[in-house]
Image: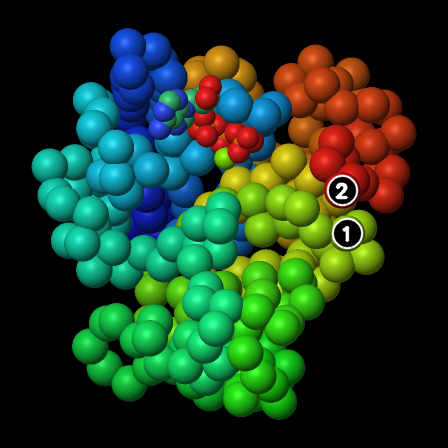
Amino acid sequence: MSAAAPLLEAADLHVWIEGSHILQGVSLTVPDHGVTALLGRNGVGKTTTVRALLGLVPRTGRVSFDGEDITARPTHAIVSRGIGYVPEERGIFSALTVAENLRLAERRPGAPRYALVHELFPELAARADQPAGTLSGGQQQMLAIGRALLNDDRLLIVDEPTKGLAPRIVREVADAVARAAERVPVLLVEQNLSLVRRTADQAVVLDAGRVVHTGPAPGLLDDADRVRALLGVARAAAAGGPEGRRTA
Ligand SMILES: Nc1ncnc2c1ncn2[C@@H]1O[C@H](COP(=O)(O)OP(=O)(O)OP(=O)(O)O)[C@@H](O)[C@H]1O
Ligand SMILES: [Mg+2]
C-alpha cells in the first residue's frame, strides 16, 4: 500500500436504529498518521459512526482497513487487524488496580508494550497498585488509552475522552492524546474544541447523520463563522476560548 493511501476508509455508511435513519451515507478516511477529529453536535451520529466502523451495529456501505475490505468481518476480526477502541464510557474496571486493568487488556499476540505505556504515562506505573476507581478523571482516561496502546495497534479510536471532565483536566487528556498520537494514528471523537485545537490534524464534521465538512483541522478551527455554523459553538470558543460547548 502506498504511503498516501488511507489507513481506514468508510464509504456510504447507513445505519438504521429502531426505524430511524441514524447514519445517512457517511464517508470518511483516516490517514496513517496524526489525529483525525470526528466532530459534531450532540446526537449527530459520532458514536454510531465509530460503532459502524467496528461492526458493532448493523450497517450498509463499505469499510476498509489498510486496503482490505473488512465490511463483512465480525468485530473481533476487525479489531484484531490492529484497532484499539476507547469507548465513551472508557471501559475500565473501577474495582481493579491499574496494573490489573492493563493486564486484562492484553489482547494481541506478542509482547504487550508496557515500556511504551509507562514511558508515555509514567503515572500509571507509579499508581500500578491503586484501584482504578480512585484515579482522577484524567488519569482514568490515560489508563483507558494505555490499555489500547498496550496491543501494538495500528489505529486508536477514542470516543469523547473529555466528556464530563473539568476544564483543567481537559489539558491532561489533550496531552495524553497527543502523546499517543506520536506512536499511533488516532481517530478522535470530540466536542471540546480546545482539545481538537491542541491535537487534530484533520477534521470530519457530522450533522444529522451526514458528513458536512472534511479538511485540515486548523483551517476549520480558524474560521469562527464556519465553526459556529457547523458545530453551534460561540465565537469565543471557536477563536480559542478556554473550552468548547462542554465545559462541565
Ligand atoms: N441504541 C440506540 N437506540 C436508539 N437510538 C439510538 C441508539 N443509539 C443511538 N441512537 C440515536 O442515534 C442518534 C445518534 O447517536 P450517537 O450516540 O451516535 O450520537 P453522538 O454524536 O455520539 O452524540 P453524543 O455527542 O451525545 O455522544 C441519536 O439521535 C441517538 O438518540
Ligand atoms: Mg457519542
Left or right: 241 as drawn, with respect to 127: right
Name the residue type under label 2. Answer: Ala
- Under circle 2, the secondary element is loop
The residue located at (44%, 49%) in the rendering is 87
Residue 226 visible (yes or no): no
Q: Position of residue 190 (x, y in %)?
A: 59, 40
Crowd band around label 2 with a 10 angstrom C-alpha radius: few (<14), some (14–19), many (20+): few
The residue located at (53%, 17%) in the rendering is 207
The residue located at (59%, 77%) in the rendering is 121
Crowd band around label 1 with a 10 angstrom C-alpha radius: few (<14), some (14–19), many (20+): some
Picture quarter with the C terminus: top right
Give the image quarter of residue 239.
top right
Left or right: 98 as drawn, with respect to 201: left
Q: Considering depth in this image, is 74 or 18 the residue closer to the camera?
A: 18
Give the image quarter of residue 153.
bottom left
Q: Position of residue 236 (x, y in %)?
A: 88, 29
Residue at the left extreme, as displayed: 72
- Under circle 1, the secondary element is loop
Q: Considering depth in this image, is 141 or 198 the residue closer to the camera?
A: 141
The residue located at (50%, 68%) in the rendering is 94
Check mark 2 vs ligand 1: CB closer than 8 Å? yes or no: no
Instruction: Mark 1 and mark 2 in contact? Answer it, CB < 8 Å.
Output: yes
Rendered position, 28 above or below 109: above
Which residue is identified by label 1?
166
